[in-house]
Amino acid sequence: MQLKPPIEGFKWNGNTSQLFGVNRELYEPRFGDPGHQGLDIVVPGEKQGYGTPVMSAHLVPTQCHKTFVDSTLRTNGHGVHLSEGLPNGDILETIYWHLSDILVKAGDVVDPSQKIGLMGNTGFVFPAPSQSCPHCGTHTHFAARLWRQGSYVFTDYKSGWIDPVPLMYRPGDRFRMSFTRDLLLGSSGHDVAWLQTILKIEGFGAEYQPIGRFGPKTMRDVRLLQKKIGIEPSIGYVGPKTRNWLIQNYSL
């Protein structure tokens, strides 16, 4: 599975404000999820990106199976849902929320890079738009799910969300991540979610999604990563050597 950025000229430094799995304190009480359910994409400028074209992130023609128009604060605003059938029979779904306008309708076959909507600030955004700041909160929440025989493949998040960052990764990409402390079994926080994203990029973590909690599976995969990159002892503890490797290879 592979996706591409849904806006032109996308750069990890400058066009992202939230990665997957972070800010548990906001998303768990409000939505019942252990962290942020997607990737927030922003465009700096006078209008904060309002009206920027949002495109299909798929590399092949894709079915538009749902559009969603609702601007109340407890929803995700105007959105588009696209579905791609994979060779193994699974379905990869991508979701684009907070749009100011929708340019496709359910049933359309959407070509790669086709414009599907315009970036906006509908739904639950922060800071909320106001008369004095009509473009506040503008961003596109880009999310993904994987379906198999009508059910979510992953259930770490109640609605089946998966981390889109590894699907968008290209060799050499670097992210707005920082690793300033050692991580071990029982650790939690943003940096654990970022670690879990990197583990997935490196080919581990196949059966879970980043939730920002360092459990036995994360410890197992850190050990495997350490063996892969030649860090000894490979005990699943993220100490100075492993942190330095994460920073040198993935941090901006």
Image (cartoon, grey):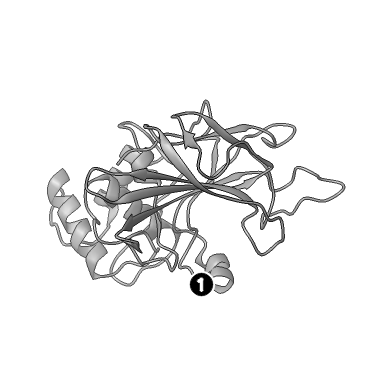
Left or right of 5: which side holds 60?
A: left
Q: Under tag 1, what secondary structure?
A: loop
Q: Mark 1 points at which residue?
A: 32
Give whichever of 80, 187 is nearer the camera: 80
- Mark 1 nearby-residue class (10 Å; few <14, some 14–19, many ≥20): few
Quarter holding the C terminus is top left
Task: Please tell me whether residue 109 is drawn above or below residue 199 in the rendered image.
Answer: above
Residue 165 seen in this snapshot: yes
Q: Where's residue 234, x and y in %?
A: 14, 57
Quarter holding the N terminus is top left
Left or right of 45: which side holds 107?
A: left
Residue 111, quarter of picture: top left
Q: Where's residue 182, x and y in %?
A: 33, 60
Give whichever of 60, 37 is nearer the camera: 60
For the point 53% across and 27% down, which residue is it? 8
Q: Residue furthest top?
A: 9
